[in-house]
Amino acid sequence: MTSLLTVLRISAKRCIRSGFEVRRNFHNRNRISSIHTLQDRRNEQENFDTLGTWDNRIDLPLLLQASIKHGKPIPKISVENVGTASVIGRRTTNEDRLRVKELRPELLYFAVFDGHGGPECADFCSDHMEDYILYWLNRGETDLQTVLQYSFQDINNVYARHILFNSSRKDASQAGTTATVCLLRNSVELVIGHVGDSRALLCRNGETKRLTTDHTADLKSEKERIIKSKGTINTDNIGRHLVNGRLAMTRSIGDLDLKPYGVSAQADTRSLEVKHGRDAFLILTTDGVNFAMSDQEICDAVNTCHNPTEAAAFVTDQALQFGSEDNATVAIVPFGAWGKYQNHKKTALNFGRSLLRSNRY
């Protein structure tokens, strides 16, 4: 009996010891597996998804040096991520132009031009604006606002000579264009130069922040300059203020016949820091979009889409649905918070929306 109890005790101890060893080996294997998994993740290219900072549906690699410098994750924005769309609307020709280009490894260029009175000026600016930007950069100018101010004046002056010596159309002096030009340096520094009534909008925290001011005679300072230059301002049947009864803006490139009457090519410029944790995208639009949709409607429309290409097509389509008859052009640059505000606001984008929110009414 005693020897039977001894055998049972020994067997029980062996079972318990075996159970402990199984559990210890199991935990050791899990711990080693977790360590290897963590090491594998560290070896992967870091991006916003692995950092877990925000809900991003675009795979944006991390700029390590810029992130270290700023003490926060900075994505690498590339021209491949930019969405663009341009539709003719109900016009016979499309005089809108847009450009998206990498001027230097650390400098991206985005621009929209809304031509009027013929395509010559919009074509010229689309083809050559970047040349003058690079000219001043290569001369050692580091202030991007100064670069844009010089570039706008240069291209207006060169276009005047181009029309004088190369254009066969008699009324080519009446061709002009708006210009909204953005430079993005190191994915952080955003600089905008602007003349006319095309716009740059920023989606921050789900709300729209307008980065440009429409140059129209509604502005006191613009009106005073036109009047001081002996120009006149007339109002058409839909309430627009027209310089000398012809032009619905007070600043533009081209419109050479109106330059003596105060229509200026001097660009308004501004610079701001992109906050990738809060900024979802930058959108450039021509007045074919702005005439039919409010800034917030544009922002909400983009936030319903999965990628910038889809969003650009959707915004131009909505502008036509809401009654725009002009050319409509959009360029969308995604930032770090892309997709974060998809459900921020539920806006019904259909004919039943409040008409009072539209610039058309």
Image: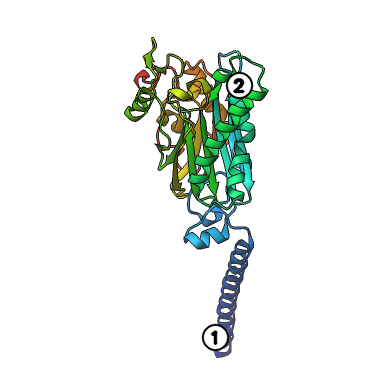
**Residue 328 in view here:** no
Task: Work out whether mark 2 precedes mark 1 in sequence or the reverse, and give the earlier one.
Answer: 1
Q: Where does residue 130 sit, x and y in percent of width and height?
A: 61, 39
Of residues 112 and 206, the one nearer the viewer is: 112
Q: In the picture shown, does residue 30 fall above or below 279?
A: below
- The quadrant of the picture occupied by the C terminus is top left
- For disc 2, the marked residue is 119
Give me the disc on residue 5.
1
Q: Where does residue 73 sit, x and y in percent of width and height?
A: 51, 56
Quarter residue 163 falls in: top right
Quarter residue 134 falls in: top right
- The quadrant of the picture occupied by the N terminus is bottom right
Q: In the picture shown, does residue 324 fall above or below 12?
A: above
Q: In the picture shown, does residue 331 fall above or below 35?
A: above
Q: Residue furthest left?
A: 220
**Residue 285 in view here:** yes
x 44%, y 21%: residue? 291
Relative side of 241 to 108, left or right = left
The residue type indicated by label 2 comes to Pro
Q: Are marks 2 and 1 in contact (CB under 8 Å)?
A: no
Q: Residues within 10 Å of mark 2 (few under 14, many from 20)?
A: some
